[in-house]
Image (spheres, helix red, strand yellow):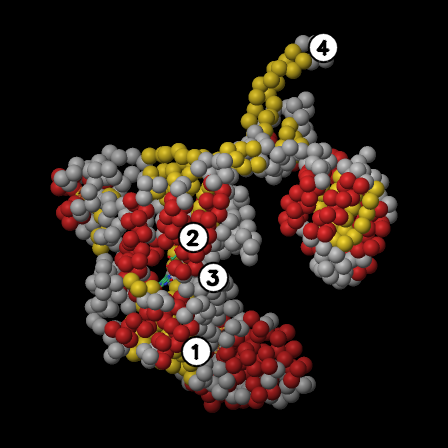
Amino acid sequence: MQRIGVFVCWCGSNIAATVDVQAVSDALAKEPGVVYSTNYQYMCSEAGQNMIKNAIKEYNLTGVVVCSCSPRMHEATFRKTVAAAGLNPYMLEVANIREQCSWIHKDKEAGTEKAIVLGRTAIAKVQLNAPLQAGESPVVKRALVIGGGIAGIQTALDIAEAGFDVDIVEKNPTIGGKMTQIDKTFPTLDCAACILTPKMVDCAQNEKIHIYSYSEVESVKGFVGNFTVSIKKKARYVDENKCTGCGECTTKCPMKNVPNEFNLGMDNRRAIYIPFAQAVPKVATIDPNYCNMLKNGKCGLCAKVCGAGAIDYKQQDQIVEEKYGAIVVATGYNPIKLDKFDEFGYSLSKDVITSLEFERLTNAAGPTSGTLLRPSDGKHPHTIVFVQCVGSRDTSGCGKPYCSKICCMYTAKHAMLTREKYPDTDVYVFYIDVRSPGKNYDEFYRRAVEQYGVHYIKGMVGKVAPRADGKIMVQASDLLADEQLHIEADLVVLAAAIEPDKSARPLATMLTASMDTNDFFTEAHAKLRPVESPTAGIFLSGACQGPKDIPDTVSQASAAAAKVIGLLVKDKLTTNPCVAQSNEMMCNGCSSCERVCPYGAITYVDKEFRMPDRTTRVRRVASVNPAVCQGCGACTVACPSGAMDLKGFSNSQIMAEVDAICQMK
Amino acid sequence: MNNEMMKEQVIRMSGVNPLKCMRCGKCSGTCPSYDEMEYHPHQFVYMVEKGEIDKLMASPSIYKCLSCFACVERCPRDVEPAKLVEAIRLMVVRQQGQNHLKANEIPALLDNDLPQQALVTAFRKYTK
Ligand SMILES: Cc1cc2nc3c(=O)[nH]c(=O)nc-3n(C[C@H](O)[C@H](O)[C@H](O)COP(=O)(O)OP(=O)(O)OC[C@H]3O[C@@H](n4cnc5c(N)ncnc54)[C@H](O)[C@@H]3O)c2cc1C
Ligand code: SF4
Ligand code: SF4
Ligand code: SF4
Ligand code: SF4
């Protein structure tokens, strides 16, 4: 029988207001094995922790139960406390009487009764606790960043700066992400390329950074400190090491009508292409969907013109396997498709465009060389209507329920820049709310109104109808004037909602990292751990975690890097000793546990066993790798013979807890 | 019936929760009958929320709505303003002698182009 001490916390009034803490410590004092029971205002305070340490010594305690907040909050704290007093840290149990009791009950009598039951349950478990020893696992001193937008670039640069190797896996032929497509950036209006391309070049030149461009993550195995990742380098049919990026091939290729994704299909590229002049790596890529040579073996012109002999039509996808200590997800976002919004006429007219297309139409490297012209007839637009919140804040099922956060600001930017460059243009912005919190953000938006004379109208556009004469009829409400407006526009710009990249969901499954219902990666704690995933060793950077502009993205990217560096400087990690273990006498080698283990921690060994009749028999039994097992317990439920058990959460401990809950008093 | 009771009834009949409205005005931006109406779709939503049912019942707007459901189709928050217009119209026509269309008025209104279905619809909308 253990000698157990019980410590009931008031948590100020958080617990004490709805739970009679004195009654709880009195009741629990009568439980079998309890030799000491008390309550105190703040158990986690230094004074509270000293009470625990002193009691352990004075009463020779062998087990401790703290009735307090969730173990997620302070289990680690109290484990350290009992260890400091010489007890094995796993002889501590926390009964959660705050989140699971005082915070959710109003009636003090019922709350008190439930707190007693929760305390009794923890006591029943501690009776069966055994000392556990944490193991150690080595840390691979290399990080992987998935996604090479500004988020991934900043994270990689910061990790490299600290002296660690870091690889970037980018699915496109070049790194840079959406920021490469943006012209100028709010709130300071510096040119995106001028501030981004030096960072891209830094990545390419930094010897600590390796870029896998045109590559994707195929599979992820392992655990924090020790991931094994397969990376697929897609065939680009050009030898990266030989190509000098001269671009000769991209001017000679006869396939001239390939929609250019960099300019969002508003102009064409060739079948062999370099996305844009400052691409990193600056290497050509052949698009197999359009290349004549790859499709039917006729052509081969690029190989003839390439002085470097870099073209290789026989190149195959290649799989590379690498080990990493930490993984950062930086997969970013995309604007949503607008096919569910017929009322805005996006598919009906070339002159109804998205905001990202607008960026390309004003960019010197864009399809119009930076002159704002209508895509349909190349004429200068005189009346432009911007529509905010297209598909954002939409609970009807067509769009996204959240605010996309960046569109109010970039729309103000677009409106302002248009008025500056083309003062003869009438610019309307339809808004529901203008959301401009942030340093110098509201000032920026007000400048658009006050200095540049942009017409901001509170109300939503209800209908966009292209007319035969090329004008676009915009019907909208002006809520403040209580009017319905009919505007003859030349160009309509839709601020489309943004959503996570479609590849994020399968990636999250590979990483066992959690996501919210909108497919944004979830952080470990919304306030206190915003750059870590709840899965150890997985970190989050940029818009893949939620809509973000560049300043927010870069802050988060550097924060994620700091967390990664904090992990990689360690030589060893202590492992969680609460891992699974099979009882070989009961295991029948059925493979059920191996199939459910999400971490691949279970293998089978053939072992000799002595039978009762003194013969030996070889049996196949499960064996758990304690360094890989995360203690999720899936195998213990799957095992049909009850052979699998979790240390610290054994079947008998769980049953003892259930019995304690069901016990009538 | 006072306004508060009528509000409850309108909400029950329509199944609309006016608190879902984020006041974007898309319904009124889309409404083809806007200029004919004294109160516009978004105002129906707001006025029901405030409980100003008597004003809405007295307004000719309830007969100007075409029941085209454009506002229902396009509302980003699924508020369904036209259902409120309909509920308020019903509040009126269900009262004694408040039918907006009487059978003996029909012959004078008929012309060759009027589809039969429009008649049926009008009866459904404007009479008990
Ligand atoms: C029209 C418009 C204008 C804007 N203007 C401004 C502005 O003026 N100022 C400002 O601060 N912000 C602006 N923004 C916001 C800005 O674009 C974002 O804040 C920024 O791009 C986010 O960076 P990111 O790296 O998180 O995502 P991204 O830029 O989307 O980068 C993600 C990268 O990851 C890659 N990737 C995705 N999935 C995978 C995968 N599975 N494997 C490998 N690689 C993958 C993608 O190819 C991409 O390269 C604007 C946005 C839009 C739409
Ligand atoms: S493949 Fe050859 S021709 Fe094309 S850019 Fe590279 S070096 Fe130049
Ligand atoms: S940022 Fe502005 S435009 Fe974008 S969804 Fe939010 S409120 Fe609408
Ligand atoms: S469209 Fe919907 S959310 Fe917008 S004002 Fe009308 S009822 Fe309200
Ligand atoms: S249903 Fe009525 S209120 Fe709604 S858009 Fe049509 S005419 Fe306007």
Task: Indicate which label's residue lies in the foreground, 2 or 4.
Answer: 2
Q: Which residue is mark 1?
A: A458
Q: Which residue shows up at 57% across the image and 74% down it?
A: B18
The answer to whether dots 2 and 1 both sit on one chain is yes
- Callout 1: chain: A
Q: Give SS at disc 3.
A: loop
The answer to whether dots 2 and 3 both sit on one chain is yes
- Callout 4: chain: A
Real-space CA distance between mark 4 and mark 1, rounded to the nearest whole angstrom = 89 Å
Real-space CA distance between mark 3 and mark 4, rounded to the nearest whole angstrom = 69 Å
Q: Quadrant of residue A614?
A: top right
Amino acid at circle 1: Lys
Real-space CA distance between mark 2 and mark 3, rounded to the nearest whole angstrom = 25 Å
Measured as percent of width and height from the top left, residue A275 is found at 25, 51
Sooner in the amino-acid sequence: mark 2 or mark 3: 3
The answer to whether dots 4 and 1 both sit on one chain is yes
Cβ–Cβ below 8 Å for labels 3 and 4? no
Q: Quadrant of residue A12?
A: bottom right
Measured as percent of width and height from the top left, residue B78 is found at 52, 68
Front residue of B126/A620: it is A620
Real-space CA distance between mark 2 and mark 4, rounded to the nearest whole angstrom = 65 Å
Q: Which residue is mark 3?
A: A400
Front residue of A48/A598: it is A48
Q: Which residue is mark 2?
A: A557
Amino acid at circle 4: Asp
Real-space CA distance between mark 3 and mark 1, rounded to the nearest whole angstrom = 21 Å
Cβ–Cβ below 8 Å for labels 4 and 1? no
Task: Indicate which label's residue lies in the foreground, 2 or 3.
Answer: 2
